[in-house]
Each structure stands twice: as structure tokens, then as C-alpha cells.
Image (spheres, rainbow, N blue to C red):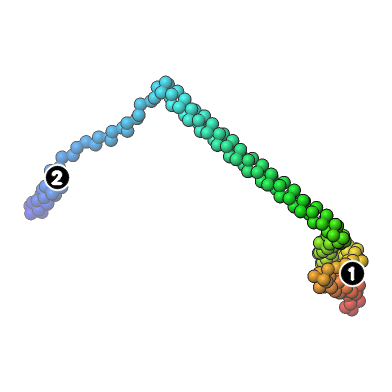
């Protein structure tokens, strides 16, 4: 037993020597508090606000001046463009009057239908478009009246629009024939 006691005493002594450390522990000190800038005085605050107000007032005045300048330039450009348009219109009217006078003086008869070609073309195009829409939407009363107008103008339709007229007429006739057909019933 003596040996066991001795052995335990040796192990304990070794544990104490190994576990001890020569390092000295220093107590923890809290980190220093962050430095707070000093609070500006009321006078400094008022001066800063006055400076900011002055800067905003100056920037606003500059923006107003620039806007007035741009608006003035736009007005000048618009005025110049309008004057140029008036001049050109007067020139063209004068040329037209001269041409009419010359034609009349030379005994040339003016054809009144010259200006109506574009009007007829526009009207026929509009009616063809309307008829197409009415047929597709199954609005038969409107389609009937529009096709009647087109049929009444048939001899005035320009050659360039004849194929479109023929196509719409065919579509109208086919749709009308299909509309009048009754659907067969199954087992009734």
C-alpha cells in the first residue's frame, strides 16, 4: 500500500507541476469608449442651416433662369418655323393661282374631277375596310348597307382598288350564302 500511496503522490505532484503555468494573468480592461464629437453650438447650427438655405435658393434661381432661357429659345424656334411655313404657303398659293390663271388664259379647260380622284379612292378604301369588318363580325345590316354604297359607286372605283372590291364582294356573297343556309339537324 505504501507503494500505491507513493505512486499517487508522485502522479499528483507531476500534475501540479505540469498544470501550473508561469504566465501571469492580467485583469481584463474594457476597451476605451468611442469618442463623441462635440455637439455644435446653436450659432454653428444656425450658420450651417443658413448656408444650406442659401445654396438651395441659389440653385433654384439658376434653374429658373435656365428654364426661362430654354423656353425663350423654343419660342423663337417655333416663331421662326411658323413664319417659314406661312412664307412657303403663300408661295405655293401664288404658284397655284398663277398656274390656274395661265391655264385659263391659254384656253385650257380645268377638269374639276382631278381633285376628286383622291377623295373617291379614300371613300372606297374606307367602305371596303368597313364592309370587311362588318362581314367578319356578322353585322349583316351594316354590311348590306356598305356593300350597297360600294355597288352604287362601282363605275367610279379606281382600277387600283378593283381587285380589293372584287375580293370583298366575293367574301360578302359567300358569307351571305352561308348565313342563309340552315344547319342540318341530327336525329331531330
Please determine whether, in this image, residue 41 is positioned above or below residue 11.
above
Residue 115, image x, y percentages: 83, 60
Residue 155: numbered disc? 1
Towards the viewer: 168 or 84: 84
Residue 15, image x, y percentages: 14, 49
User: How many tags in the picture?
Assistant: 2
Query: From the viewer's perspective, is 82 left or right of 26?
Result: right
**In this rendering, which labeled residue sits more in front, label 2 or label 1?**
1
Residue 35: numbered disc? none
Name the residue furthest front: 106
Does the image show residue 46?
Answer: yes
Query: From the viewer's perspective, is 138 left or right of 13?
Result: right
Does the image show residue 134?
Answer: no
Please determine whether, in this image, residue 74 is positioned above or below residue 135.
above
Which residue lies at the image location 52% right of the left edge and 33% below the top edge? 62
Name the residue furthest top: 43
Which residue lies at the image location 91% right of the left edge and 72% below the top edge? 180
Residue 34, image x, y percentages: 32, 33
Q: Tell me which label, 2 or 1, sits earlier in the chain.
A: 2
Find the distance from the CA under tag 2 to the CA under tag 1. 122 Å
Residue 21: numbered disc? 2
Which residue lies at the image location 91% right of the left edge and 76% below the top edge? 188
Query: From the viewer's perspective, is 42 left or right of 84?
Result: left
Which residue lies at the image location 54% right of the left edge and 31% below the top edge? 61
Residue 143, image x, y percentages: 88, 65
Crowding near the residue tagged with mark 2, few <14, some 14–19, many ≥20 C-alpha atoms within 10 Å = few
Crowding near the residue tagged with mark 1, few <14, some 14–19, many ≥20 C-alpha atoms within 10 Å = few
The secondary element bearing badge 1 is classed as: helix
Amino acid at each position: 500500500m505504501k507503494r500505491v500511496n507513493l505512486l499517487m503522490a508522485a502522479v499528483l505532484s507531476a500534475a501540479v507541476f505540469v498544470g501550473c503555468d508561469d504566465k501571469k494573468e492580467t485583469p481584463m480592461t474594457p476597451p476605451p469608449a468611442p469618442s463623441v464629437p462635440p455637439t455644435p453650438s446653436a450659432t454653428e447650427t444656425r450658420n450651417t442651416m443658413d448656408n444650406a438655405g442659401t445654396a438651395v435658393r441659389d440653385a433654384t434661381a439658376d434653374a429658373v433662369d435656365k428654364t426661362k432661357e430654354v423656353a425663350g429659345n423654343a419660342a423663337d424656334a417655333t416663331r421662326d418655323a411658323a413664319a417659314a411655313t406661312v412664307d412657303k404657303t403663300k408661295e405655293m398659293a401664288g404658284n397655284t393661282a398663277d398656274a390656274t390663271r395661265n391655264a385659263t388664259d391659254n384656253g385650257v379647260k380645268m377638269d374639276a374631277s382631278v381633285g376628286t380622284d383622291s377623295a373617291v379612292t379614300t371613300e372606297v378604301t374606307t367602305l371596303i375596310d368597313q364592309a370587311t369588318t362588318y362581314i367578319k363580325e356578322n353585322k349583316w345590316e351594316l354590311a348590306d348597307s356598305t356593300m350597297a354604297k360600294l355597288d352604287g359607286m362601282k363605275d367610279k372605283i379606281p382600277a387600283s382598288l378593283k381587285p380589293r372590291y372584287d375580293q370583298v364582294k366575293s367574301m360578302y356573297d359567300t358569307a351571305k350564302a352561308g348565313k342563309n343556309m340552315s344547319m342540318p339537324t341530327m336525329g331531330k
